[in-house]
Image: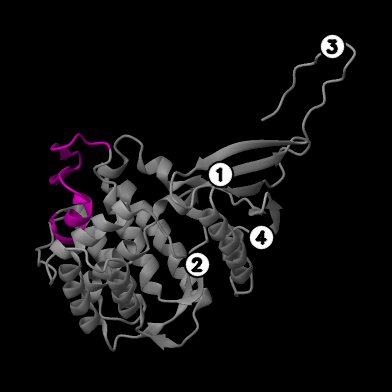
């Protein structure tokens, strides 16, 4: 956006005061156009992000994100405040809310993730996990409320049952969630603020550390710290086969083949190899840091899959997770750790 074509030699060429770059244009039911706007006169100044809803549902999402950004600023974030966009203002354009917030620095983790060979290199993937969970642990520590709660598994079970009533895979999914609820019952942990969609596409990095986290429309000032942890490892696993032809083995993961829905999640939770060990170990350590039994990592993952099934914008995506959940083992498989 910028530049002009003079209509005549006597007319001055008026440069626009700002430049804009389209960052994303979603096709989801809550589709939004997201622009990064920077000043032409001060190129080094911090930019602004403008979110424009394409649908009524998207307008509700944009409005909620604005309110959540305000709520986040009321929390004792400390140094983490610079990693979270700051609410600037809400505009009304043709009856729909438009959100303006500050931009946060960094490169989306998705760029590295989809580069050739990134997800086949253990060191690169471990660096992503370490950066994301270092930020997440600091965020949860800074915003902890100290009130023990074990409601999240039950909430997931109720949400799945409510959304997918009558679906043939519901009974199998509910059976696994009921077992997870039973094992997690009595394992309350202090509540904290929750991002709500903590997948690697919403994480920005600089020099190996998280410099920004975006898209806060699903955030909550008080919730379960288990939710964000599960969402990150599951989403990272989900797309491992994205650049592999159907039926072929995924490079760097000899036991992973692109077949069916979400083979990467099946591999992460039940397979053998360095990546499944990383997923299981990361979840287990996070649970231990919260004062919980690290052996409950699998139950947290089951609830994380259920949460996606219950909350996904696209029915096909949600149903895929429901059907996946219904086919998973009730108990985690036991594996010997591979030699280092």
| Label 1 with label 3: CB-CB less than 8 Å | no
Horizontal side, residue 29 vs residue 295: left or right? right
Q: Secondary structure at mark 2?
A: loop
Marked residue nearer the N-terminal end (1 or 4): 1
What is the CA distance from the residue labelled 4 to the residue labelled 2?
Answer: 14 Å
Q: Residues within 10 Å of mark 3 (few under 14, many from 20)?
A: few
Q: CA distance from mark 1 to mark 4?
A: 17 Å
Residue 105 position (above or below residue 233): above
Between 289 and 47, the residue placed more toward the observer is 47
Name the residue tied to disc 2. 219
Res 33 label: 1
Q: Nearer the viewer, residue 254 or 101?
A: 101
Q: Which residue is mark 4?
A: 87
**Marked residue nearer the N-terminal end (1 or 3):** 3
* Residue 190 location (% of width, % of height): 42, 83
Nearer mark to the viewer, of 2 and 1: 1
Which mark, residue 8? 3
Q: Secondary structure at mark 1?
A: strand
Which residues make up the magenta segment? 243-272
**Res 36 quadrant in image:** top right
Give how far across and how far down residue 110 sits, in percent. Answer: 41, 44
Dot in front, 2 or 3: 3
């Amino acid at each position: 956006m910028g530049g002009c074509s003079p209509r005549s030699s006597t007319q001055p060429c008026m440069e626009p005061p700002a430049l804009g770059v389209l960052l994303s244009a979603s096709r989801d039911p809550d589709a939004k156009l997201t622009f990064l706007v920077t000043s032409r006169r001060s190129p080094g100044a911090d930019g602004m992000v403008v979110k424009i809803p394409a649908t009524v549902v998207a307008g509700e999402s944009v409005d909620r994100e604005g309110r959540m950004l305000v709520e986040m600023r009321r929390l004792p974030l400390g140094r983490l405040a610079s990693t979270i966009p700051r609410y600037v203002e809400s505009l009304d354009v043709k009856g729909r809310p438009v959100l303006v917030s500050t931009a946060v620095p960094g490169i989306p983790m998705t760029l590295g993730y989809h580069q050739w060979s990134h997800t086949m290199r253990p060191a690169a993937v471990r660096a992503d996990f370490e950066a994301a969970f270092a930020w997440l642990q600091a965020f949860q520590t800074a915003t902890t409320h100290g009130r023990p709660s074990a409601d999240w598994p039950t909430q997931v079970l109720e949400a799945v049952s409510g959304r997918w009533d009558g679906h043939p895979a519901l009974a199998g999914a509910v059976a696994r969630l009921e077992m997870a609820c039973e094992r997690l019952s009595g394992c309350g942990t202090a509540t904290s603020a929750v991002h709500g969609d903590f997948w690697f596409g919403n994480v920005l990095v600089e020099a190996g550390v998280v410099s920004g986290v975006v898209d806060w429309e699903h955030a909550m000032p008080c919730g379960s710290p288990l939710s964000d942890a599960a969402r990150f490892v599951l989403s990272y696993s989900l797309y491992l086969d994205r650049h592999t032809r159907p039926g072929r083995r995924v490079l760097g993961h000899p036991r992973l083949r692109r077949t069916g829905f979400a083979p990467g999640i099946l591999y992460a939770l039940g397979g053998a190899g360095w990546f499944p060990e990383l997923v299981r170990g990361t979840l287990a350590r996070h649970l231990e840091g919260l004062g919980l039994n690290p052996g409950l990592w699998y139950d947290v993952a089951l609830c994380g899959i259920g949460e996606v099934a219950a909350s996904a914008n696209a029915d096909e995506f949600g149903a895929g997770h429901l059907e996946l959940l219904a086919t998973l083992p009730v108990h985690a498989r036991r594996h010997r750790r591979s030699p280092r």
